[in-house]
Image (cartoon, rainbow, N blue to C red):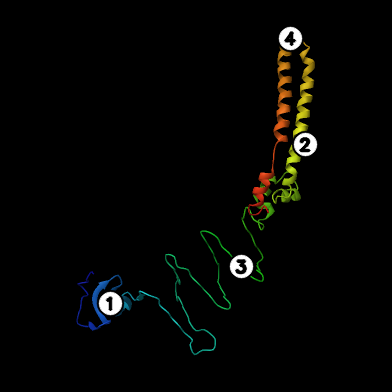
Amino acid sequence: MPVNTNLQNWAPWAFDKRPNFVFQTSNPIVGFGGATVLQQVMEQNNQTGIWGMTEDGQMNIFNDDCITITGGVTKDGGTCLNLIGKNGDVTITAERNGDILIKGSNILIDADENINIMSKKNVTISGKSSIFFDTPNLATNALTGNLAPRDVTFGGLVFRGTKVGGPAISDAFTGGALENIQDQLKDAAKDASKQLKTLSGNLDPLEAGMGPGAARARELASQASELGGQLQNQLSSIDTSGLSNALNNFGGFT
């Protein structure tokens, strides 16, 4: 341990040692907080507890096992324990695999400005009777879930400004309209096939013509007819049951 030779003065040092107890004051050996103003060390059964004060003004309490602070044993109510940070923060940290438990009949959190709750995973708020939000403005940026606003969800943003109405968006993104998507696609396939066949028929008269365009017209008519048949076959075979089941198992689509 480093020694501050400029301030080293052993004259005021007081030391008392017992089998499982050490008490000292004014130890000039410098630690992280300077020399020791007062220190008490207690040892028993390979367990150590230390409390003391250093020159920088810090009071430190260390213990190998649990520390219990109890107040209000003879009181019938009111405040029994105060933890006050006069001009700074109050930090409570459970390291490694420890939890922080705050328990009482009622718990009140009162902030002059903001309250921020952050979690790297999930946040669960459970009210056995009810949960009430008293605020003039309540917002969320959730993309899915049954509380996600329709106007800011993925589906709402995709169909914003289109002719797809609110009920259609709501049904489609809650699984309600997925039952009809297959039929709608099949109808669309039939219409597209008819249009392609009409195009093919319009090109047929050109086949009887002469000149360089006749061969090209026959080729286009054949391609249009083939494309129409392929489109109808492909769209008619679409099965949306898997998509419906997947969305029903996804949060916000049930």
Secondary structure, mark 4, is loop
Q: Look at the picture and state if 71 lies above or below 163.
A: below
- Few, some or many C-alpha atoms within 10 Å of disc 2 (few <14, some 14-19, many ≥20)? some
**Residue bearing mark 2:** 187
Q: Work out which quarter of the rendered image holds the N terminus and state it.
A: bottom left
Mark 1 and mark 4 lie on one chain; the one further toward the N terminus is 1
- Residue positioned most to the bottom: 74
Whether pointer 4 and pointer 3 mark residues with C-beta atoms closer than 8 Å, the reply is: no
Q: Residue at x 74, y 38 (%)?
A: 185
**Residue bearing mark 4:** 211
Secondary structure, mark 3, is loop
Mark 2 and mark 3 lie on one chain; the one further toward the N terminus is 3
Q: Percent x, y for residue 73?
A: 48, 87
Q: Residue at x 53, y 59 (%)?
A: 121
Q: Look at the picture and state if 190 lies above or below 11.
A: above
Secondary structure, mark 2, is helix
Q: Nearer the viewer, mark 1 or mark 3?
A: 3
Query: What numbered label is drawn on residue 126?
Result: 3
**Residue bearing mark 1:** 36
